[in-house]
Structure formats: C-alpha cells, structure tokens
Image (spheres, grey):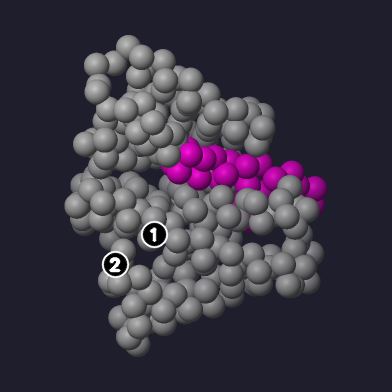
C-alpha cells in the first residue's frame, strides 16, 4: 500500500510532464527490470551489458526520433550482444546467449518505449498524448483489479491452469469490460477527442487482452525458472517486472492500435 501511495503520484506526474522526465523514469524502470530479468534467466547466461546498452538505446531512440530510432536501438542490440559474446568466456551457444538478451530488450525496452511514443502524440487543442497514456495506465489497472475481484468472487473456470492457476475466464471477461469502460469514457469522440466510439471500445478490448497476455508471459518465464517473484525491491509487491509485466504488452498493443486507427 505504501509503495502504491508514494509511487503512483510520481508516475502520473512524470507521465504528464513527458519528455526527458518520462524518459528518466522509463530508463530507471527498464534497467531495474532488465537486471531482474537477467537474474531470472541467469542459468542461460544472458549478455547483461549488451542488454543494458540495448535498453538505453531503444528508449533514447524513441525519445529523440520516434519509432524508427527506437527500432534502430532494438536492432543495435544484436551486434552489441554478439561483440560481447565474442570477448566473453561463456560456453553458452550464441543463439541462446544473444537470443535471450534480445528477448529482454524487446520485451522490456520495446514495451516501455511505446509509452514514450504514445505520450509524444502531437496535440492541437487537447493534451492527446497525456490522455492516451493515462487511458492505457488506467485501463490496465482497471482490468487487473476487475479480473482479480471477479476471479476471487465468482471465478470457476481456469484461464491457463498451467501458467497461472489463479486466473479465471470470469475474471478475464470482467477485466475486458472494465478496460473497455475506461477507454470509452476517456476517448470517444463525443468528447471531441480523437477516437470514434467503435474505436474506443475496440481500444479498450485490445488493452485488456494484451494486459492478460503480458501477465501470462511473465508467469511462463517464472515457471520455466522455478521462481515466484522477479525480485524483492517492492516488498510484498515483488520486483519491478512483477508490477509492469502487463504494461509492457498493453503499451505496445495500444500504440500499434493507435497507428492502425490513423492517430499516430
């Protein structure tokens, strides 16, 4: 509770401020997340320094040049990782060492970079970037809360018995409804904002599905590595990755949905 009370206002303020303020927040979260990821898969011997470099380059590219430069940062991870592999003493095959490193950069750096891209949506009469970024954050929070509450109250049918036994289809559909409601009331065009009604409804559904998949994806990694949490930095909340796993998929899905809608 204390972590949320302190951290949430700070995050919302930095998202509103955007620019280098948001960049600093995302780099910090990404580097900590990458550290937790490398510890999680340490038995696979990821190339940690290359991972850190790829994370920073991806986020810096998004801040300086938008999507093309962010993609350039992601691709730069491959030669950097291969160079580190060449001078390292690991006996891990290059495909595994480089591949697991690139996975972390794409997952964490790419996912967080999309929040920079959403926040940077140009505005004329409205704070469209801020509104879109807040909508994604609130929709993910609403979907997660509704899924947890409905799952505890009425959940009977397991969503993924192997990956996450605690999640249910009842909770999932409650999360979808909650995310759609947030997106609809925040973005539909009767408020003179940039999405038509059908787009706002679809936008919420996309966020809800991506949020659930993001959570399941991290659960699958933790299951493979036989761990419960990715860290202890946030006390009972686990590690940073345990808090942002849903956002990493949801942010990317939301950004490319906005691209498809012609907003970006």
Choose top left, top right, bottom left or bottom right for residue 33.
top left
Res. 17 visible in picture: no
Residue visible at 28% across and 60% down in the picture: 1
Q: Disc 1 marks which residue?
A: 215
Q: Which residue is mark 2?
A: 162
The structure residue drawn at horizontal position 56% and vertical position 58%, both measured from the top left corner, is: 136
x and y percentages locating residue 204 in the rendered image: 60, 67
Q: Residue at x 59, y 64 (%)?
A: 206
Region of the chain picked out in magenta, as a range: 106-133
Element under label 1? helix
Q: Quadrant of residue 205?
A: bottom right
Q: How many marks?
A: 2
Query: What residue is at 58 percent from the left and 41 percent from the top?
Result: 116
**Disc 2 element:** loop
Instruction: Answer whether residue 122 is magenta in the image.
Output: yes
Label 2 or label 1, whichever lies nearer to me, is 2
Residue sitting nearer the eye, 221 or 261: 221
Query: 73 above or below 180?
Result: above
Confirm or deny contact between disc 2 and disc 1 (CB under 8 A): no
Q: On screen, 169 above or below 37?
A: below
Whether residue 190 appears in this view of the structure is: yes
- Sooner in the amino-acid sequence: mark 2 or mark 1: 2
- x then y, percent, for residue 40: 25, 42
């Amino acid at each position: 509770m204390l972590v949320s009370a302190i951290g949430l206002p700070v995050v919302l303020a930095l998202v509103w401020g955007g620019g280098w303020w948001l960049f600093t927040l995302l780099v910090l979260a990404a580097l900590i997340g990458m550290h937790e990821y490398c510890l999680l898969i340490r038995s696979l011997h990821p190339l940690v320094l290359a991972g850190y470099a790829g994370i920073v380059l991806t986020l810096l590219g998004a801040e300086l040049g938008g999507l093309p430069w962010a993609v350039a940062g992601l691709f730069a991870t491959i030669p950097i990782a291969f160079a580190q592999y060449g001078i390292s003493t690991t006996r891990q095959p290059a495909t595994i060492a480089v591949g697991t490193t690139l996975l972390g950069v794409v997952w964490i750096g790419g996912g967080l970079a999309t929040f920079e891209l959403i926040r940077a949506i140009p505005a004329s009469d409205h704070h469209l970037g801020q509104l879109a970024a807040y909508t994604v954050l609130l929709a993910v929070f609403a979907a997660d809360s509704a899924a947890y509450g409905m799952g505890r109250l009425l959940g009977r049918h397991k969503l993924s018995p192997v990956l996450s036994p605690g999640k249910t289809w009842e909770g999932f559909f409650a999360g979808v409804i909650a995310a759609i409601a947030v997106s609809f009331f925040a973005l539909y065009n009767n408020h003179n904002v940039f999405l038509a009604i059908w787009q706002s409804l679809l936008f919420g559904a996309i966020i809800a599905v991506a949020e659930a998949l993001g959570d399941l994806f991290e659960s699958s990694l933790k299951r493979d590595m036989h761990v419960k949490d990715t860290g202890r930095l946030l006390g009972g909340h686990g590690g940073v990755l345990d808090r942002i796993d849903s956002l990493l998929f949801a942010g990317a899905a939301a950004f490319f949905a906005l691209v498809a809608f012609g907003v970006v």
